[in-house]
Image: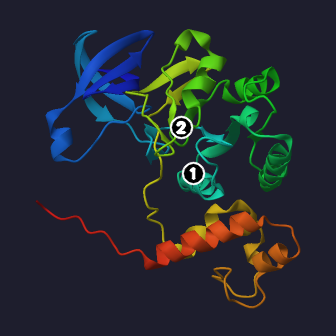
Amino acid sequence: MAEGQIRQSLSGFYDIYSEGKMYRTRARGNFRKRKITPLVGDRVKFDSSSPKEGYILEILPRDNALTRPPVANIDQGVVVTAVAAPEFSTNLLDRQLIALEVSHIAPVIYFTKTDLIDDDRYQTFETLAAGYRKIGYPVCLTREPFASTGLDQLRDTLAGKETVIMGQTGAGKSTLLNHLSPELTLATGEISTALNRGRHTTRKVSLMPVANGLVADTPGFSSYDTLTIDYRELGQYFPEFLNVASECRFRGCVHVNEPGCAVKDRLAAGEFMQSRYDNYLQLLTLLKNQKPIYNKKK
């Protein structure tokens, strides 16, 4: 029995990296019965008679995991966000940040397609980026989306860590990785203007050596699954709200109608981003109205 890390998942096969070699394996049959799904990034114990034939025997405890994209044991997530084509949405960006916060994965924001907008629109994103930096999120925004300054900043961020590159379909994830490591030659796709969403171009999930770290390039998507957290917990995943929540008059304040709310006071004073609060209210309403999902036996 050996130990290694799943580096790639494709059609039921799992490629495991162990002691400088790669082994192609399948999951044990009882994994399906126990509803256990190996994820890229998992540390596992496996048995292999040859580099092309083996079985995963055990998945070691995970530090964290995402279901969309399906990866585990990730240090940070780079949210690749297009400023145009597809149309930019603060709501989608905040949902992605929350998904990372819930999984205790450090977010990084990288804006792409800045060459498609005029200077006035770019200034709007400068202001937006400043707002996210104030919260504490690392943000990369340059007038040319793949300028050396931005790429060098990202290379420093990736070094020595395991990172997931995530974002809306068509945002430029594969293009970004190709600029970081041209030898990858990842497939890229054009945007469908009729549907305002990209064609899926990534066919597998894998961890690849990039910029002295490991990076997961994952299939794109146009939206996130519904959050399953309790609505009263949502404020914990907005760092700026969490930092001042102790100053609210009432314990358990959800920052909507309560008097003496420190979050609303900061918002009124212009210290918090209005778009963040608006998205918070929208998500709060969705979570409050969300019906519980029960597992049904077929």
The image quarter in which residue 110 lies: top right
Position of the N terminus by quadrant:
top left
The image quadrant of residue 281 is bottom right
Can residue 247 be seen by looking at this rendering?
no
Specify how the rendered protein is coloured: rainbow
C-alpha gap between disc 2 and disc 1: 15 Å
Sequence-first disc among 2 and 1: 2
Per the image, the residue denoted by label 2 is: 74
Could you say where residue 278 lies in the image, as x and y percent from the top left?
67, 70
Disc number placed over residue 172 in the picture, else none? none
Choose between 16 and 261: the one closer to the eye. 261
- Tag nearer the camera, 2 or 1: 1
Q: Residue at x 83, y 79 (%)?
A: 265
Q: In the image as oriented, which residue stretches furthest toward the right?
A: 269
Give the residue type that dot 1 points to: Gln
Q: Which residue is mark 1?
A: 96
Q: Nearer the viewer, residue 30 or 255?
A: 255
The image quadrant where one finds the C terminus is bottom left
Label pair 2/1, CB-CB below 8 angstroms: no
In the displayed structure, 277 sits above or below 177; it is below
Is 63 positioned to the left or the right of 237 in the image? left
SS under mark 1: helix
